Image (spheres, rainbow, N blue to C red):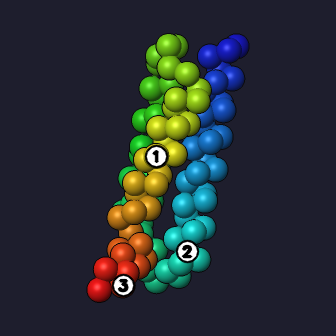
Amino acid sequence: MKKTLGTILVAAAVVMLTGTFAFAQYAAAGAGAFPYFQFGCLVIGGLIVVSLKRKFEQMYTAEAVGVFALYTVLMALFTNPVIETVKTIVS
């Protein structure tokens, strides 16, 4: 039961973080410039983290959620609105 509950919590965190990423990117860039590739990578990464949590009992729930949160930030850094903002700040 503990293993299933931990996996469910990680899956819920993955869904919430992915939804937050999608909403933020849609609000920043609009529908025409939505980063589908990064969104797809985020979904695949979430599936991998959830399956690793399911397979390895030694992995803590907080570790899996933290890893995916950092992965979400990394994906967000390599989207067009963020890169344009960095270009504006640098120049």
Badge 2 or badge 3: first in the primary sequence: 2
Question: Separation of disc 3 and disc 1 at Cα?
Answer: 24 Å
Report x, y in % for residue 36: 41, 66
Which of the 4 quarters of the picture holds residue 23?
bottom right
Which residue is at 61% across, 47% downward?
15
Query: In the rendered structure, are the residues bearing label 3 and label 1 in contact, judged by CB atoms less than 8 Å apart?
Result: no
| Callout 2: SS | helix
Q: Amino acid at mark 2?
A: Tyr
Which of the 4 quarters of the picture holds residue 6?
top right
Badge 2 or badge 1: first in the primary sequence: 2
Q: Nearer the viewer, residue 83 or 45?
A: 83
Q: Amino acid at mark 3?
A: Thr
Report x, y in % for residue 72: 47, 52
Which of the 4 quarters of the picture holds residue 22?
bottom right
Which residue is at 55% across, 54% downward?
18
Q: Amino acid at mark 1?
A: Leu
Report x, y in % for residue 78: 35, 64
Quarter of the image where the N terminus is located: top right
Question: Separation of disc 2 and disc 3 at Cα?
Answer: 20 Å
Report the disc number at residue 70. 1
Closer mark to the observer between disc 2 and disc 1: 1
Q: Is residue 63 left or right of residue 80?
A: right
Which residue is at 29% across, 86% downward?
91
Badge 3 or badge 1: first in the primary sequence: 1
Closer mark to the observer between disc 2 and disc 3: 3
**Residue on which disc 3 sits:** 88
Count of numbered circles in the view: 3
Q: Is residue 10 left or right of residue 87?
A: right
Report the disc number at residue 33. none
